Image (cartoon, coloured by chain):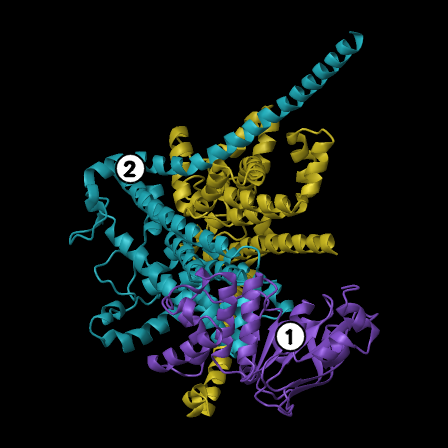
Amino acid sequence: MTRFQQLIAKNQAALSTHRKTVNVVMLSLTGLLTLLALIPLFWIIGYVVYRGGKSINLDFFFHLPRPLGMAGGGVLHAIEGTLVVTLLAAVFAIPPGVLAAFYAVRNPNTPLGVALRFSTDVLSGVPSIVIGLFAYAIMVKPMGHYSGLAGGVALAILMLPTIIRTTEEMLKLVPHALYEGSLALGAPEWKTSLSVIFPAALNGVITGFLLAIARAAGETAPLLFTTLGNERYDIMGIIRNGILQHQSFFQIFGRLVNQPVDSLPLTLWKYAQQPYPERIDQAWAVALVLMILVLLINIFARLWIETRKRRLQG
Amino acid sequence: MVGNHTHSTPELVMKMEIRNLSAFYGKFRALTDINLEMYANRITAIIGPSGCGKSTLLRSFNHMNDLTPNARVEGKILLDGADINSEHVDVVDVRRRIGMVFQRPNPFPKSIYDNVAYGPRLYGIRRKADLDELVEKSIRQAALWDEVKDKLHRSALALSGGQQQRLCIARALAVEPEVIVMDEPASALDPISTLRIEELMHDIVKDYTIVIVTHNMQQAARVSDFTAMMMIDENLSGRMIEYDRTEVIFTRPKDKRTEDYVTGRFG
Amino acid sequence: MHTHAKTLSEAQLLKRLRRCFQHGDRPWQGILITISILIMVLILAIGWMLWRESADARSLFGLKFLLPTSDASWDPVNDHFQAWPFIFGTLLTSLVAILLALPISLGIAIFLAELCPEWLRLPLNWLVELLAAIPSVVYGLWGIFVFLPLVVAPVGQALANTLGHIPGLGLLFTGPMPQSGSSRLGAALILTIMIIPTITAVTRDVLLAIPNHQREASLAIGATQWETIWQVVLPYSLSGILGAVILGLGRALGETMAVTMVIGNSIEGTPSLLRPGYTMASVIANEFAEAVTKLHTQALIEVGLVLFFITLLLNMIAQLLVWRVARRTPQEARA
């Protein structure tokens, strides 16, 4: 018998069983932990659907809030506010984000390129409430009042890292041959980037936008002291009045964004803290709307990119 | 210099036998009807052009193909007469009994000592004295001891390619397998390291059965007692063309395809 | 002579064309560079703004603002502001969350990277990421009305009955839990759920990046799959896992809405997990819009500054760690 065989001779069978048992137990444990993590997911979604579904009706979507005690009333102001602020944020964040992504793709190894990627990652870790404070300091304080504009800026800063990162990844997927071919034909760099590379990456890039928008739509903290909240926000009313009073486009636009604005997450936050059952019910309904909005965008965006990817590879 | 080593068992004793082995990746049949015998304390070489399934064959011995999804092996693989391709076989035990050395050295990013001690530790050997003994024995067998005996606790990644490969051999030897399969062990190495490994093989074959896959025919001729010739058929499936003593394969092969291959007419 | 003049003008024409195209290119490059610099400057701008807008508070309170002095309190009425209670609350809840989330996330990442059958991988990845997509306020609402009464309260009670009697450690588990369940424990548990996707995703990517030949080397010796994971795969990826944990910690520190809604928002003397607490993000969220005095506002901004610096530091460390792992394991990644 060799030395090795000697050493392992005693309790070899027991050790072997032990090793196999540990293997099965630990591997199963990882599967169990995965299931465990999914429990809150289904619990929250299920409960929100159940509780929120009870309080939702058509009124909810199309009416402004009514004082407590009066039936009906909805959260139209919040829905419109969310739309306006999120749209503003997208307009503010997408152009610079895409341009920065162009730079990062073309110059991955220059000092600026490396610093840009590093900064983007670090920026994505800044808490959203701190970004809200920043937006307060540069917009609300100088302007003297809360506004949808300030909220848009705050959310734009929040969206920026996501947009840069996903746009960059999608641009990288475009075959280099396309870029070289366009340049060889004599097209300048900017034209190549905008008319050739970007459209080729469009599907993935749009997915990135959608995911960033979904995140921004669900944020509360940055809006707490930028848009503040406004229960009488009514886009149609503003536009109608503006037209009646012959206001210019800019005046109407200004009125739309330059005042406090509400949003779905803000409304949820406010209603959840009020001691009135009707408000709590509405809070659940808002949660349902918000969750559907966010999850739908998420699921849609991912399905979009998966089918496009499969078509490219197929 | 054909199989020029003294045999510890002058008569041929069957160690491993492959019967009607076929391997599948999903629907694709990578190997068809392989039959092969490997004798104890002998070196068997498997040669053939690239892509003919030599690696697949080797990996089916110790169930490494189980890692690939949709991989399936049919047929019998007999180790000392017992079929290790059956469903009830203890895969972990088979892998200890059949050690494998890979084409590219793959030491763990641990110390040299810990690399070789990895196997014994799995088997519950904990005492430092015991481990020291086993580690030294294995590294000596791999002809690496003099070069590393003073730096056992340095990282294995600091070694050269040839040294790393010998370390991987030592690591495989530490759990005292019965069969050692080597998948082109020297193809990524320089000629001197290659020679070192071939000498190593000569030295340890008295204790082990060795199967080596190589695309280097001169190496097969130098080192092995038996040689098996594989090629892909018209369905791109690997088949065993001819199998015989090395001197026969290289001087008077029976199959024309073998003759063409060993005389360098193609491949 | 004639031909010479012709070729000259051709060359001149080409030069002019080239310059024309380059003209398009230079402003383009200029725009790209400007935007990129602006984005980098953004982080500095945030820090600078916070620094500037908290100047009075900083000069008034100095370092005492952060320290756990015996009289550390937050008193807007008397203009006395010390952030220690919030710092403590933030650190306690986040650290407990990390402690709980780490093994769970590790397990999930191992399952996703090593064990999961191919067809299940994408859907499971989606589902785990979906956990991160749920808005924080929705977590908070569910937290108040479902999680606190049904999970946190009973768990807290059980902890008080068992661990509350241990000397030393028991300090963390004493004191009656409020009937609503609002407590640091509630915040820590909800944070755990919320940071699991972050840690899991990064860890999973780190594990997937480990070359397959390492696993093969281990299995070929006769190690079981678990032994391979525990003794080869995980040690190889330690710095990446650390980076994931730090990223998760950063996320936990900055989480505002869900925490505010379940933590009880009160400063108290006891360090117990079962009592209500307060975090840096929560106090800013609750008090900023209604802060009356300038000093109050500045003090809140200073809290924001502290939060900013801590998360900034953690993020930079995490990026360096994850970046290091990505550099160490280049092309040979798992399928």
The type of residue carrying mark 1 is Met
Q: Looking at the colours in the rendered structure, which chain would you say is drawn in cyan?
A: C
Q: Which residue is mark 2?
A: C54
Identify the element where label 2 is drawn: loop
Check disc 2: other Cα within 10 Å, few if <14, some if 14-19, many if 20+: many
Q: Nearer the viewer, residue B108 or B16?
A: B16
Q: Residue at x 66, y 39 (%)?
A: A198
Q: Nearer the viewer, residue A178 or B155?
A: B155
Q: How many discs appear?
A: 2
- The correct choice, above or below, for C81 with respect to C16 in the image is below
The type of residue carrying mark 2 is Ser
Whether label 1 touches label 2, CB < 8 Å: no
Check disc 1: other Cα within 10 Å, few if <14, some if 14-19, many if 20+: few
Q: Nearer the viewer, residue A138 or B94?
A: B94
* Position of the C terminus of chain C by quadrant: bottom right
Q: Residue at x 24, y 38 (%)?
A: C57
Q: Is residue A98 left or right of residue C227?
A: right
- The correct choice, above or below, for A204 with respect to C29 in the image is below
Q: Looking at the colours in the rendered structure, which chain would you say is drawn in yellow?
A: A
Residue B1: image tag: 1
Q: Is residue A91 left or right of residue B257?
A: left
Circle 1 chain? B
